[in-house]
Image: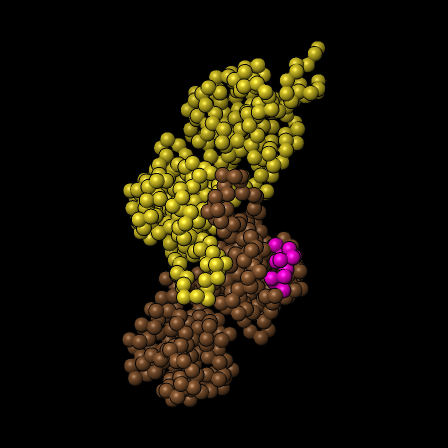
């Protein structure tokens, strides 16, 4: 299939890049100094896009590639893809669900434990040589804390299953109630925030969920409450989050995603009740390879006219 | 009749209360005061100007119960000065500060911390493991240093699901750790003094074989003569270059010098440690490693645990003085 031209939008995985190079004619968007230059050389040959959470396939890109047949995203999130445009033009879209569910859920749990039990702060305390001068203070107990999950999809459910093993009562807000679980359902996010101690954002980013965690929700969660975000930065009104943390109106936060990655509000750097990660929720050796394999398998299936493995559109 | 003038006995009424000797205040007393023990008359040895052996000879000859923290070694010498002692209540999860054979010989009962701390310690063990495998503290350092927008790429972590986790010591704490990690899809195996017929995890009779079949070792056992330096270079080499060690037991269960060597020589992938051989001193090589997570022996330090321990201590003392079974007697010495 090396006559088929595939566009990779950003450097996301060496393994994936090599796999694509072996099988297709690979074009790398980031090697072009200008958009015009890129389009001049490639607009009529590209039949597939491999995008990720940084650069997907927006309307402009889709419109400028008349031979585009499929967008295979190296992510489960679809917020960087103009799905409506793809649907209109009959362009297929695939993502990487399931293979990364465990890893993202693990990071959510790791962030919860790190914030509540101050794991990172303890580590800093020891490294700075402060232990001989006096003991570290108390931290709150984690087991049994009430966990509220926004979005009970694959990732939200995986988080719930893990938190349950710590005796945490689980409640959730989702587009629809899931009667097959025995978790407590709230029909709106404010009630969920009022009734939990740790609020975890685990839903997809859509127009409806943009800034779903706003000042009102943060106030409802309160000065003892903890916010964990492993969804998308834009789920949370970031300036509101920062001021709530600086003013002590929120108890703590564990964040893997931000509104303008890779920018992270520097005012958070001096806070001890915050744990910051650089969008690595699915970044393990095992999972990144599995995601890459899924991208490749979807592309091969498409060009061999076989059923797609994980189609979205 | 004149009341004897010794510490803790201020009025006629308190002569009726059962006496409890306290050599050094346990953390719960330092943080909560001693009101939770108002039903007892506390003999506070540390408040006396007398040297300990004199104090005990004068005031503690008829004392039946002793409350002790974890850091205070209860040796034969002290026991010799307490001829009436029948019970020791310890607030520590570990028992390595107690000369167990000597206590057994004298028929002195020991009330342990029971499972008051088990959830908190298990939470810390899991927190340390996720941090080491997914590099949470390292990621936090990376972001705070402003490295995200630079060429310094953050390295990939390692998946928890399907990891073979070898638990060393399947007591109350080990079982809480196992329960949690099962929910993450880890495969649990264990070694313990005795096989536990009520659990279905595969049992290994020695730690070397366990290490050979594991990706992670979590040290959840107590420190005894048998377990001192049990985790040595052989065990760590058997665990392998991708192996991770988590220690929430006692520092001396691991040969710390050999642990540092293995980490420096990359014979081990990482470690999460809440305890060390010479606390509060931590080997300086560890202080600059990105693949270790260090904690200052804080696994049990939550307000909830400390409050629960006050109730637990009170419960054990009440049981003893009313001739009822102890809440958490130590058997199988």
Number of numbered discs visible in the structure rendering: 0
Estimate the x, y position of residue B128 in percent, counting from the top left.
45, 49
Q: Is residue B304 left or right of residue B80?
A: right
Q: Find out whether residue A246 is within the magenta segment.
A: yes
Name the residue at the top extreme: B1
Q: Determine the residue positioned at 37% across, 34% down.
A: B228
The quarter of the picture where the N terminus of chain B appears is: top right
Closer to us: B16 or A224? A224
Q: Determine the residue positioned at 48% across, 62% down.
A: B146
Residue A141 seen in the current view: yes
Q: Is residue B98 left or right of residue A146?
A: left
Q: Which color is chain A depicted in?
A: brown
Closer to us: A181 or A156? A156
- Image coloring type: by chain
Q: Determine the residue positioned at 29% across, 46% down.
A: B237
In the image, the segment drawn in magenta is A240-251
Q: Determine the residue positioned at 57% across, 14% down.
A: B58
Estimate the x, y position of residue A139 in percent, counting from the top left.
56, 46
The quarter of the picture where the C terminus of chain B appears is: top left
Residue A119 seen in the current view: no
Q: Is residue A223 left or right of residue A201?
A: right
Closer to us: A63 or B155? B155
Q: Find out whether residue B241 is within the magenta segment.
A: no
Estimate the x, y position of residue A162 in percent, counting from the top left.
49, 55
Estimate the x, y position of residue B57 in percent, counting from the top left.
54, 15
Residue A240 vs A145, above or below: the answer is: below
| Chain letter corresponding to the colour yellow | B
């Amino acid at each position: 299939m090396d006559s088929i031209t595939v566009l990779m939008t950003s450097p996301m995985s060496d393994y994936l890049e090599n796999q694509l190079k072996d099988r297709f004619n690979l074009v790398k968007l980031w090697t072009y100094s200008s958009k015009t230059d890129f389009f001049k050389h490639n607009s009529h040959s590209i039949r597939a896009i491999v995008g990720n959470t940084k650069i997907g396939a927006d309307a402009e890109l889709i419109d400028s590639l008349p031979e585009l047949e499929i967008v295979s995203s190296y992510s489960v999130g679809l917020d960087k893809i103009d799905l409506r445009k793809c649907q209109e033009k009959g362009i297929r879209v695939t993502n990487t669900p399931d293979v990364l569910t465990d890893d993202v859920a693990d990071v959510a749990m790791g962030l919860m434990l790190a914030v509540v039990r101050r794991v990172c702060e303890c580590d800093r305390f020891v490294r700075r040589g402060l232990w001989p001068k006096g003991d570290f203070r108390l931290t709150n107990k984690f087991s049994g804390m009430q966990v509220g999950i926004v979005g009970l999809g694959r990732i939200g459910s995986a988080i719930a299953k893990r938190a349950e093993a710590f005796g945490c009562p689980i409640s959730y807000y989702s587009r629809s109630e899931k009667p097959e679980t025995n978790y407590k359902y709230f029909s709106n996010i404010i009630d969920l925030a009022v009734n939990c101690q740790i609020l975890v954002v685990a839903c997809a980013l859509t127009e409806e969920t943009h800034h779903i965690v706003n000042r009102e929700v943060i106030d409802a969660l309160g000065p003892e409450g903890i916010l964990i975000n492993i969804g998308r930065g834009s789920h949370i009104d970031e300036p509101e989050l920062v001021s709530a943390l600086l003013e002590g109106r929120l108890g703590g936060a564990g964040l893997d995603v931000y509104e303008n990655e890779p920018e992270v509000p520097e005012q958070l750097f001096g806070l001890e009740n915050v744990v910051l990660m650089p969008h690595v929720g699915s970044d393990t050796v095992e999972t990144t390879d599995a995601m890459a394999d899924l991208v490749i398998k979807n592309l091969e299936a498409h060009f061999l006219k076989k059923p797609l493995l994980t189609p979205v559109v | 009749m004149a009341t004897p003038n010794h510490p803790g006995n201020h009025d006629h009424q308190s002569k009726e209360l059962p006496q409890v000797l306290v050599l050094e205040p346990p953390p719960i007393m330092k943080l909560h005061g001693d009101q939770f023990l108002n039903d007892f008359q506390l003999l506070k040895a540390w408040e006396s100007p007398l040297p300990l052996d004199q104090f005990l000879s004068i005031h503690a000859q008829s004392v039946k119960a002793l409350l002790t923290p974890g850091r205070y070694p209860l040796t034969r010498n002290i026991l010799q000065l307490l001829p009436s002692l029948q019970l020791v209540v310890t607030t520590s999860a570990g028992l390595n500060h107690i000369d167990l054979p000597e206590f057994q010989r004298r028929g002195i009962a020991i009330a342990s911390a029971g499972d008051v701390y088990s959830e908190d310690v298990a939470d810390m063990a899991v927190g340390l493991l996720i941090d080491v495998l997914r590099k949470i503290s390292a990621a936090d350092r990376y972001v705070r240093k402003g490295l995200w927008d630079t060429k310094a790429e953050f390295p990939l972590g390692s998946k928890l699901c399907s990891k073979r986790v070898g638990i060393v010591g399947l007591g109350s704490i080990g079982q809480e750790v196992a329960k949690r990690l099962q929910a993450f899809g880890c495969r649990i195996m264990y070694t313990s003094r005795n096989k536990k017929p009520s659990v279905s995890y595969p049992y290994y009779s020695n730690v070397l074989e366990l290490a050979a079949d594991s990706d992670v070792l979590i040290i959840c056992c107590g420190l005894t003569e048998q377990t001192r330096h049990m985790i040595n270079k052989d065990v760590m080499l058997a665990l392998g270059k991708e192996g991770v060690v988590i220690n929430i037991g006692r520092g001396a269960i691991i040969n710390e010098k050999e642990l540092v060597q293995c980490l420096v020589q990359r014979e081990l992938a990482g470690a999460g440690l809440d305890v060390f051989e010479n606390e509060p001193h931590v080997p300086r090589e560890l202080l600059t490693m990105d693949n270790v997570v260090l904690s200052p022996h804080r696994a049990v330090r939550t307000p909830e645990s400390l409050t629960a321990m006050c109730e637990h201590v009170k419960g054990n003392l009440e049981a003893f003085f009313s001739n009822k079974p102890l809440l958490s007697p130590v058997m199988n010495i």
